[in-house]
Image (cartoon, rainbow, N blue to C red):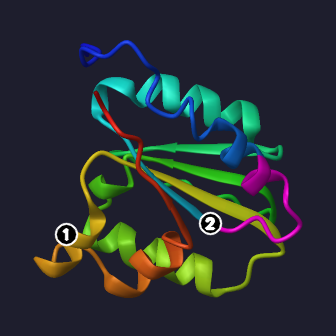
Amino acid sequence: MTTPHSTEFPLAASAPLVRRLTAEDRRPNLLVRCPGGWADRVLHMLVQSCEPPVHLCRLPGTLDLPSERTGTVLLENASALSPAQQICVHDWMSRGFGRIQVISVVFEPLDSMVERGQFLEPLFYRLNAVSLEPEMR
């Protein structure tokens, strides 16, 4: 995977905001949009900021949601969730949270996927409590 031609890490300006949002008592769910070439760096920054334990779900692939209700669930490439996985995540999130935060990294806008009927609208609104979309130069 190649890194886009840019001299600035795409979430560098957002890093203090991410740290604040992952440390707050409420800890809202975050939806982070980034170009695929930056995914590993963005995930690394998010893992550094998140409250442990961090449970990473790499998608596409097997969806393995944790039974514990503390820490952070990091969905890499949430836009690759199959329709069945979207329902599974929505049902899992609907059962109550405890102290768990869901951070979703997407490589394409989920709102346009919702408009095309490719992404479950109620899940989009659960994941998109706070949205971060870095500017690429």
Above or below, 53 against 101 in this view is above
Q: Secondary structure at mark 2?
A: loop
Q: Position of residue 99 (x, y in %)?
A: 84, 68
Q: Is residue 122 left or right of residue 99?
A: left
Numbered range of the magenta stretch? 20-28
Total number of numbered labels? 2
Above or below, 38 against 19 in this view is above
Q: Is residue 74 left or right of residue 5?
A: right
Residue in view at x 25 percent, y 16 percent: 1
Query: Residue extending furthest left?
Result: 116
Q: Which residue is mark 2?
A: 29
The residue nearer to you, when weighing 68 against 137, is 137
Q: Position of residue 91 (x, y in %)?
A: 53, 83
What amino acid type is highlighted by mark number 1? Met
Residue in view at x 56 percent, y 29 percent: 12
**Can you tell which mark lies on residue 113?**
1
What amino acid type is highlighted by mark number 2? Asn
Residue in view at x 50 percent, y 70 percent: 127
Q: Residues within 10 Å of mark 1 (few under 14, many from 20)?
A: some
Q: Secondary structure at mark 1?
A: helix
Residue in view at x 33 percent, y 84 percent: 121
**Can you tell which mark lies on residue 51?**
none
Q: Residues within 10 Å of mark 2 (few under 14, many from 20)?
A: many
The residue nearer to you, when weighing 14 against 94, is 14
Q: Position of residue 70 (x, y in %)?
A: 84, 60
